[in-house]
Amino acid sequence: MKKVILSFIALCVITTTGFALTTQERNWAEEARGYFAKAKEQAAEQQKVLEEQDRENSVLDQLAQGQRQEIVRLSTEIETAHKNELAAVAWRKSNEPVITQVNKYWGLGAFAYGFKVLSRHLFILLGVLAVLAAVLFALSFAFPWIGTAFSTVLEFLRTIISRFRKK
């Protein structure tokens, strides 16, 4: 056992001196360590720059997504406005005769048009009331109480008309 230990120690002493670095080799090793340290620092700086760029890209992606949503919203608004404009143009074309008639005589045609519409509605009302009176008159033969109510209403109307005539 002693022989093995002594031969191991002798071998270590002999090989250690054979594998020792010279001064120039030591300088090269130190220089290489410096290059590796600089490379590690540059890699760390580049990693920081990449992380910062990733953060900026994330912010830019969010902004781009917001812009896409805004584009979709605006295009929807534009389509809606276009449909409304087409509806307005169709309405204008369909009402062109009325618009022309109302704008005649520096706008005084509006009075004539209004009077025409009013008279038409009054004639329709007169016709409806005449038909209603005829139906009530016909029903008064079958139901005497309708005839009594009808004559009372007519008497009331005659009274109102006669009061207006006296004034």
Image (cartoon, rainbow, N blue to C red):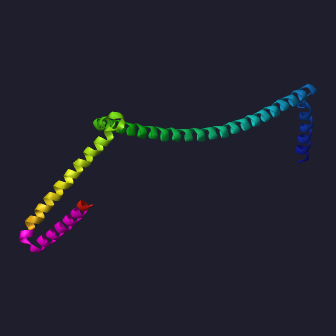
Q: Furthest residue to the left?
A: 141
Q: Is residue 110 left or right of residue 74?
A: left
Relative image position of residue 150 (x, y in whole percent): 15, 68
Magenta segment, which residues?
140-163
Percent x, y of residue 137:
10, 65
Name the residue: 40% across, 36% down. 82
Front-most of residues 81 and 153: 153
| Direction from residue 161 to residue 88 in the image, left or right | right
Tell whether 8 sits left or right of 84. Answer: right
- Residue 1 located left or right of residue 54: right
Please tell me how many numbered marks the rendered image carries: 0
Give the prevailing secondary structure in the magenta stretch.
helix
Q: Quadrant of residue 131?
A: bottom left
* Frontmost residue, 1 versus 155: 155
Q: Please say whether residue 126 is one of the residues in the magenta stretch.
A: no
Relative image position of residue 134 (x, y in whole percent): 11, 61
User: Against 150, is 38 above or below?
Assistant: above
Q: Dividing the image into 4 quarters, which one contains the C terminus?
A: bottom left
The answer to whether residue 145 is magenta is: yes
Identified at 87% across, 27% down, the residue is 28
Q: Nearer the viewer, residue 69 or 84?
A: 84
> Residue 110 or 23: which is nearer the viewer?
110
Which residue is located at x 72 percent, y 35 percent?
49
